[in-house]
Amino acid sequence: MRSLLLLLFRRIVAIYFRQVEVAGAVPTPATGGRLFAANHVNALVDPILVLTQAPCAISPIAKSTLWKIPGLKWLLEAVDAVPIVRRRDDPGKSVEENAAVFERVAAHLAKGGNILIFPEGTSHNEPHLLALRSGAGRMLERARVESHELTFQAVALEFDERDVFRSRSLILFGPVRRVGGLDANAITEQLRADLSELLVEGSTWEERVMVVRVAEMFANDQKARTLENINVLGRRIEEARRVLSQTAPETVSAIEAKLRDYLTKLDALEVTDEAVARISHGGGIEIASDRLARAVAMILTLPAAMIAFLVYFLPYQLPRLVTRKIGDDPDTSSTYKLGVGLVVYPVWALLLIVLAFVELRLSTASIATGLLLLSPFAALPWLDRWDRLKGRLSLLIPSSKRKVKLEALAMQRGTLMKTLEAANASVPATGT
């Protein structure tokens, strides 16, 4: 049952996310006796990502209130999840309750099982890590009594747009650490250091967004736009910004002012930095053989994609509407959209299939059923590339006024990149 559920949710993750990258010290299928600790910014989507993408079996630790949600309790039990009662959920919880959970987790680890925990204690919408709880360290400290081969590993979760359907995600596994003689406090501190090292952070959202946008600009120049590369560049830029803020704050302020101006003009022209970078380097629209093959495939499947856009327009809007009604919080939006979508799409498709067999001949209804089930997969590539396609089309036949603005923006970008490169080079690399 667990294997079937993981297979199902891997397919769901592949539909919800345009791309999921797994990088770093990825565990092997034989990994055991390890505690995985991840940052927590996307509610129930975070554990789903780790559990479905990790090669080894992992049991998650989750807040006990999730067991009260109809249907979810069965899923949690199927993946051998461990409920933990948080102080905020039950201020009167006893020490014995806590000890029982710790004993269960410790026994699981000591027998070679793996555990996933979110040591921040809650999903949040902050641009940086929250203070880590010591629970993970105490679990390992207790399990060490029964086994001396225990390890722990930080897992960083990054998203380009975490609350948007068909965005991208990165699962970055940090270095494997041995528990050895470390106590709970030392383990907690090591996890904090590892997670902080793996994540791109900022003291404010504006600061973090700027760091990521600069990283994307460097990635566009390198023509290496994977989230892993953007993460590496972002951590390097974050470190350079931190050092320069201490040694030359006026330089940081001047660069950020120029960056804001460039990004404002970029948004006003409704064009991507990737497109402006191509103009800046004197390039045109790239037509690589693999892209040409994808373009031909998309054109051939366009009729099916149009059918999907028409037939599934209403269920496509419902998850978004429900999320806004409940509360459009970035760290829970994906969970609500995914949950509503898992109910709405199958029900909608089933109703249309039943209607087809009631109203049409058997042969026609069979063809309609095939289109209803397969056409959404033809629509996904168009949905993924729609914004990029609009930007590229605007570059093919720009108006004279727009052409002048784009050329001026490309020159501005070139000057800005030289400034950014000089600032980045002025700070010695620290191994990130």
Image: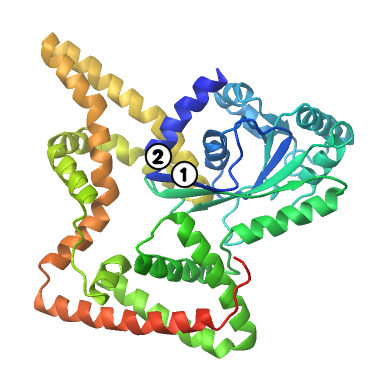
Residue 200 in the image: x percent, y percent?
Answer: 56, 62
Give the residue number, with chain letter if any, for mark 1.
334
Badge 2 crowding class, 10 Å Cα cut-off, few under 14, some 14 to 19, many 20 or more, is many
Can I make out residue 160 in this image? no
Image side of residue 396 versus residue 72, left or right: left
Pick whichever, 342 or 428, lies toward us. Answer: 428
**For residue 277, above or below residue 299:** below
Q: Residue at x 62, y 67 (%)?
A: 431
Which quarter shows the C terminus? Answer: bottom right
Q: Tell me the distance, in whole angstroms, between the alpha carbons under discs 1 and 2.
A: 9 Å
Pick whichever, 327 or 162, lies toward us. Answer: 162
Which quarter shows the N terminus? Answer: top right
Pick whichever, 99 or 137, lies toward us. Answer: 137
Image side of residue 11 versus residue 90, left or right: left
Residue 304 falls in image quadrant: top left
Q: Earlier in the sequence, mark 1 or mark 2?
A: 2
**For residue 273, above or below residue 255:** above
The reply to whether dot 1 and dot 2 touch (C-beta < 8 Å) is yes
Can I make out residue 149 in this image? yes
Residue 168 in the image: x percent, y percent?
Answer: 42, 49
Give, as a three-letter code, the residue at label 1. Answer: Ser
Q: Which numbered mark, 1 or 2, is in the foreground of this view?
A: 2
Give the residue number, with chain letter if any, for mark 2.
16
Give, as a three-letter code, the residue at label 2. Answer: Tyr
Image side of residue 27 versus residue 263, left or right: right
Residue 236 in the image: x percent, y percent?
Answer: 55, 69
Q: Residue at x 31, y 83 (%)?
A: 412
The secondary structure type at the circle numbered 1 is helix
Residue 266 in the image: x percent, y percent?
Answer: 30, 73
